[in-house]
């Protein structure tokens, strides 16, 4: 369909090698860190120091293959799946309750479909696709309040399901956050966003205040205790604050250049499952501030590339896809580092490409594939 | 298709959107800058503190490697106490429950290999999921755990056996259970020895625990080091398992034979026997009764009935246990009775107060300090030499000798013979007797008189035996000891403990005289029944009435040595309150001596030198045939003898005397002879001990006189 155009104008298409190399570097770095952080525990548990490393490497390779395939497919191909994807992701979340569901670490969040998959990860991708498509369809009506509220209410059912069925608040927040950021870019309005942000911050402050009051009087749920542990991790050192405190110890003991790769002490049983959400603290311990900020710079570079691609995308759909991916990455990286540094209360958010998690890395690479596909749509003359 | 595409293209990513995207990027950048600042602040503000925290929470510990407590071996190298490695079965519930696949295979393997309460273990594991240290079974041998280890190590077939490990420990084992229990002592928790050798040599037997620990090296990396345990030293004793067994066998036989005879209970309150080498002070055997099982020290059932044990409260139980744990031979004190007579005579000879040629006239009693002190033969023994005094155990002769000595000299020799002082034998729990002897400053002649025949002051068996060694070995007072060598775990000698002469108590010539007197006791005196057939022997009997007087409770004893001319082995037998109608009969002790020595002497390669009489040959034959019963036969004959003497009413006059025993009256009685053996000893005038009473034996004194003069 686009063949004629291609031949008529310029045969050369843009391929974002910078993005690809950043992604490859992050993947490789992530694998090294997973090996470093998990080898102690996995050699104790599985008698194989490379147990987690091997599984993650497999997912990464599989993800790279899928990424290349997706990047070769023109992204408009996916537009027709936008609506079905939205509902399929809902069904998958419901399926977690059936015998297909899998439980791990006390939470039922996984589906076994030949391999373990987290429906929440699929929901994130389908949300990006669905919203990009929806905004395109709405056209100018996005400027109205009705359009604004429509877009904002679209992720709510999925967020509610993710939270209620899989008990996964962090994924719900991310999904809503993606929608919010996509709307922010698509809508020309500012005021409404300001108001919304003020409202959210106000509500959060009120919630924290209420929890503090409650803690003096009576019992709290585990989320309530997490808030208290966030405010004063040392007071909850043996309970909810343990992981956070150990992460802080790791960060603080790293110094400027760290103890050297593989030399972390905190990973030796003190920071449980260091290869998961708290992996950034081990990066800080082993590579120091220098390494940590270098990793942050890589993510900045990644997000910068997303921005460039979005701003030069051939059409709105492609641009919004990239914005969604950008939002996804930005939210996860920021929240993860915020949690590790105890800037925000502890909630399970993984660090893209670096934390251990097969589904996560697979779908993140699919998203990168989409972005590369959008990038391919950019004509050189447009860039220049 | 075309239409839709066109429509989509209409909505381009507008400039305002691009602008907002840049703003978004700016916000993201701000967030990253904020987070980086936070990272830097954490490092700056708390970096040092957190660095220390990380080092502080490392586990440097961790594992103690137990040492092996040294063995105790007998003279032939046979272990009588040893430590054996055992294993405690530990369950780590957290690990077992970590995966569902682990629980069943692990439990199945456990129940297959160990005799465990399936229900209880399963309940405990599932109900205490966080418990990581549960001792499921204790003190398993390696053979017991080997099948499980095999299953556990077979990772291919049994990958799911998890959370089970074995903790190493050493268990003290006494291969002979109760043998020499009082001498060996036992070991409680943490290798703390109680009583006997285990306590006295605790530090030598114990080693040093090893340790496996972690530390941080210069680069602050955790390193692990193992420091091996140092095992304890082995002590080689002079005890001989065979001699000890012989002694304990006969003590048991005696106590069983007289069980429930005059009162309820064992054949005696206690029976102690010491066998020593008089020429080195080495103790070859030391035993008392009742015994307890060293491998089960808290078990009273060997002595008490179950009802009696149930009736005890904790204090009573503790007291009862302490009573059986203590070593009678070194802990219990008693009045030695006539076995003290050779010491009094030795002191008088050595100090030159008598020559040994004196004669004294015994009219059956003596008046001293306003008290009338009787001889056991109230009709009097007539004129006696010193030797005859010893042979017949005449109190009047000894009182005369004692008065000749005087209080100061007597007390000086008490000290020379170590009475009132500890012998410092290498066993825990030796009693102090310093307050149980007379004080020379407050001593009155009556005290001196009763002391001369062994009443009024207290001794321990080990004091008496050790001092007697010096009387018969030429005057050399050896330090009594059980251990003669300390060996390293590899078998090399760490220290030799040579016989130590502490002092010269008497001269060799005095020693020769005392030996001559004591030989006479066995040849023609009160100790004839002590002699094992075919051997020459010397010795002295003792029958001491216990405090309070008049209750008929006696300590009967015999101390003797073989061969008579050149003593190679010394035996001291003490029977506390024999369970018989009339206890005042040293014959119980002499018969026990003979029974023990008859077996011990051939074992020690000391050969018979005397012709056996036909009776003796007959008796030996009988013994061989009825090995077990012979002992009880002997003791039956002893019973009959009993009724004869009846001196126990000998307490007429008593008022406060100084010293431990308060009213130490005339209490000493000697069985003067043995009715059946009387024919064997034609010389003795003691033949006619009456069954009816003390008055019926008037003629004893006179006929003996001429024999006595032989001595000079």
Image (cartoon, rainbow, N blue to C red):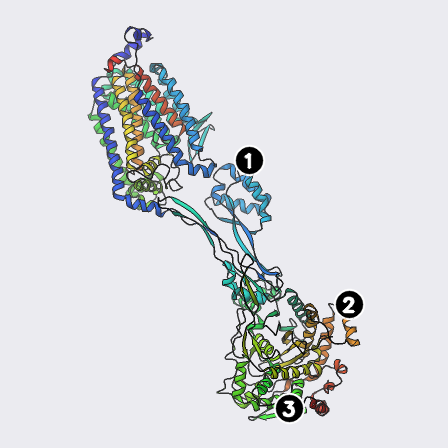
The answer to whether residue B386 of the structure is visible from this angle is yes
Chain under numbered label 1: B
Counting from the top left corner in percent of width and height, residue B373 is at: 60, 90
Relative to B489, say whether A333 is above or below: above
Residue A155 location, x and y as percent?
32, 25
B615 or B299, nearer to the observer = B615
Q: On the picture, is B351 further left or further right than A236?
A: right
**Residue, x 73% and y 87% (percent of image)?**
B685
| Left or right of B677, for residue B167 | left
Q: Secondary structure at mark 2?
A: helix
Q: Chain of mark 2?
A: B
Circle 3 residue: B357
Sequence-earlier tag: 3 or 2: 3
Viewer-nearest of discs 1 and 3: 3
> Regarding mark 1 in the picture, which secondary structure is present there?
loop
Where is mark 2, residue-wise?
B625
Callouts 1 and 2 in the same chain: yes
Q: Quadrant of the C terminus of chain B?
A: bottom right
Task: Work out whether mark 1 precedes mark 3 in sequence or the reverse, and give the earlier one.
Answer: 1
Which residue is identified by label 1? B156
x, y (%) of residue B386? Answer: 64, 88
Left or right: where B23 falls relative to B546: left
């Amino acid at each position: 369909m686009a063949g004629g155009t291609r031949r008529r104008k310029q045969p050369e298409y843009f391929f974002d090698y910078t993005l690809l190399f950043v992604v490859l570097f992050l993947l490789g770095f992530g694998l090294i860190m997973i090996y470093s952080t998990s080898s102690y525990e996995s050699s104790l548990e599985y008698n194989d120091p490379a147990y987690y490393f091997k599984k993650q490497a497999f997912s990464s390779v599989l993800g790279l293959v899928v990424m290349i395939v997706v990047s070769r497919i023109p992204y408009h191909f996916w537009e027709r799946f936008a609506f079905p994807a939205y509902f399929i992701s809902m069904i998958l979340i419901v399926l977690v309750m059936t015998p297909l569901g899998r439980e791990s670490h006390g939470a039922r969040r996984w589906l076994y479909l030949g391999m373990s998959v987290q429906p929440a990860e699929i929901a994130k991708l389908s949300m990006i696709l669905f919203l990009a498509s929806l905004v395109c369809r709405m056209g100018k009506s996005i400027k109205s309040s009705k359009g604004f509220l429509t877009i904002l209410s679209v992720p709510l059912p999925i967020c509610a399901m993710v939270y209620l069925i899989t008990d996964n608040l962090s994924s719900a927040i991310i999904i809503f956050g993606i929608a919010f950021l996509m709307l922010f870019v698509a809508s020309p309005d500012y005021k409404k966003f300001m108001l919304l942000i003020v409202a959210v911050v106000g509500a959060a402050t009120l919630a924290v205040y209420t929890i503090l009051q409650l803690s003096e009087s009576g019992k709290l749920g585990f989320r309530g205790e997490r808030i208290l542990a966030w405010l004063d991790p040392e007071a909850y050192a043996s309970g909810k604050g343990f992981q956070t405190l150990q992460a802080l110890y790791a960060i603080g003991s790293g110094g400027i250049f760290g103890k050297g790769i593989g030399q972390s002490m905190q990973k030796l049983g003190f920071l449980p499952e260091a290869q998961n959400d708290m992996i950034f603290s081990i990066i800080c311990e082993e590579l120091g501030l220098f390494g940590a900020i270098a990793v942050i710079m890589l993510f900045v570079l990644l997000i910068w590339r997303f921005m460039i691609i979005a701003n030069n995308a051939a059409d709105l759909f492609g641009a919004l896809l990239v914005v969604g991916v950008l939002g996804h990455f930005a939210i996860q990286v920021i929240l993860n580092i915020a949690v590790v540094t105890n800037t925000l209360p502890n909630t399970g958010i993984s660090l893209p490409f670096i934390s251990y998690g097969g589904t996560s890395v697979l779908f993140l690479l699919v998203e990168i594939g989409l972005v590369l596909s959008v990038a391919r749509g950019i004509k050189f003359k447009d860039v220049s | 298709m075309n239409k839709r595409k066109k429509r989509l293209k209409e909505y381009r990513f507008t400039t305002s959107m691009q602008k907002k995207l840049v703003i978004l990027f700016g916000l993201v950048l701000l967030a990253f800058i904020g987070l980086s600042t936070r990272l830097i602040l954490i490092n700056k503000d708390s970096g040092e503190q957190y660095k220390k925290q990380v080092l502080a929470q490392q586990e440097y510990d961790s594992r103690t490697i137990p040492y092996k407590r040294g063995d105790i071996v007998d003279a032939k190298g046979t272990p009588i106490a040893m430590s054996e490695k055992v294993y405690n079965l530990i369950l780590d519930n957290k690990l077992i429950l970590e995966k569902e696949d682990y629980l069943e295979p692990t439990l199945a393997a456990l129940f297959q290999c160990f005799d465990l309460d399936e229900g209880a273990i399963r309940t405990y594991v599932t109900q205490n999921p966080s418990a990581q240290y549960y001792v499921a079974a204790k003190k398993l041998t390696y053979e017991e755990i080997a099948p499980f280890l095999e299953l556990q190590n077979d990772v291919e077939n049994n990958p799911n056996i998890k959370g089970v490990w074995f903790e190493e420990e050493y268990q003290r084992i006494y291969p002979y259970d109760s043998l020499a229990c009082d001498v060996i002592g036992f070991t409680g928790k943490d290798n703390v020895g109680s009583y006997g050798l285990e306590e006295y040599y605790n530090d030598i037997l114990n080693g040093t625990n090893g340790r496996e620990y972690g530390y941080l090296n210069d680069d602050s990396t955790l390193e692990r080091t193992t420091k091996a345990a140092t095992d304890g030293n082995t002590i080689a004793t002079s005890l001989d398992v065979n001699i000890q067994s012989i002694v304990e066998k006969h003590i048991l036989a005696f106590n069983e034979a007289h069980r429930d005879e005059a009162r309820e209970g064992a054949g005696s309150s206690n029976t102690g026997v010491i066998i020593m080498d008089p020429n080195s002070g080495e103790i070859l055997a030391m035993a008392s009764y009742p015994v307890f099982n060293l491998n089960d020290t808290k078990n009273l059932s060997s002595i008490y009935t179950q009802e009696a044990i149930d009736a005890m409260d904790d204090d009573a139980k503790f007291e009862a246990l302490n009573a059986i744990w203590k070593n009678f031979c070194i802990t219990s004190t008693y009045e030695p009775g006539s076995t003290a007579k050779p010491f009094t005579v030795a002191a008088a000879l050595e100090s030159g107060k008598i020559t040994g040629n004196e004669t004294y006239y015994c009219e059956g009693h003596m008046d001293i300090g306003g008290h009338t002190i009787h001889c056991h033969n109230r009709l009097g023994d007539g004129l006696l030499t010193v030797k005859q005094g010893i042979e017949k155990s005449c109190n009047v002769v000894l009182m005369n000798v004692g008065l000749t000595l005087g209080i100061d000299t007597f007390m000086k020799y008490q000290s020379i013979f170590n009475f009132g002082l500890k012998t410092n034998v290498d066993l825990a729990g030796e009693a102090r007797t310093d307050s149980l002897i007379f004080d020379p400053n407050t001593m009155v002649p009556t005290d001196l008189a009763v002391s001369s025949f062994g009443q009024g002051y207290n001794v321990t068996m080990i004091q008496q035996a050790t001092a007697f060694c010096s009387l018969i070995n030429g005057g050399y007072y050896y330090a009594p000891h059980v251990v003669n060598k300390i060996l390293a775990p590899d078998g090399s000698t760490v220290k030799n403990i040579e016989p130590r002469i502490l002092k010269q108590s008497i001269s060799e010539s005095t020693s020769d005289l005392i030996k001559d007197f004591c030989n006479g006791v066995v040849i023609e005196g009160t100790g004839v029944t002590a002699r094992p057939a075919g051997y020459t022997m010397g010795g002295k009997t003792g029958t001491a009435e216990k405090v309070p007087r008049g209750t008929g409770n006696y300590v009967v004893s015999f101390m003797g040595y073989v061969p008579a001319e050149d003593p190679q082995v010394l035996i001291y037998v003490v029977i506390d309150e024999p369970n018989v109608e009339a206890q005042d009969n040293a014959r119980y002790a002499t018969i026990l001596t003979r029974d023990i020595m008859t077996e011990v002497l051939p074992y020690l390669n000391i050969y018979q030198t005397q012709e056996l009489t036909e009776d003796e040959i007959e008796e030996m034959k009988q013994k061989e045939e009825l090995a077990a019963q012979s002992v009880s036969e002997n003791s039956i004959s002893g019973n009959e003898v009993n009724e004869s003497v009846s001196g126990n009413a000998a307490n007429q006059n008593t008022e406060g005397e100084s010293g431990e025993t308060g009213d130490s009256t005339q209490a000493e009685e000697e069985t003067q002879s043995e009715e059946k053996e009387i024919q064997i000893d034609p010389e003795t005038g003691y033949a006619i001990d009456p069954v009816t009473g003390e008055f019926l034996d008037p003629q004893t004194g006179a006929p003996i006189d001429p024999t006595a003069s032989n001595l000079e």
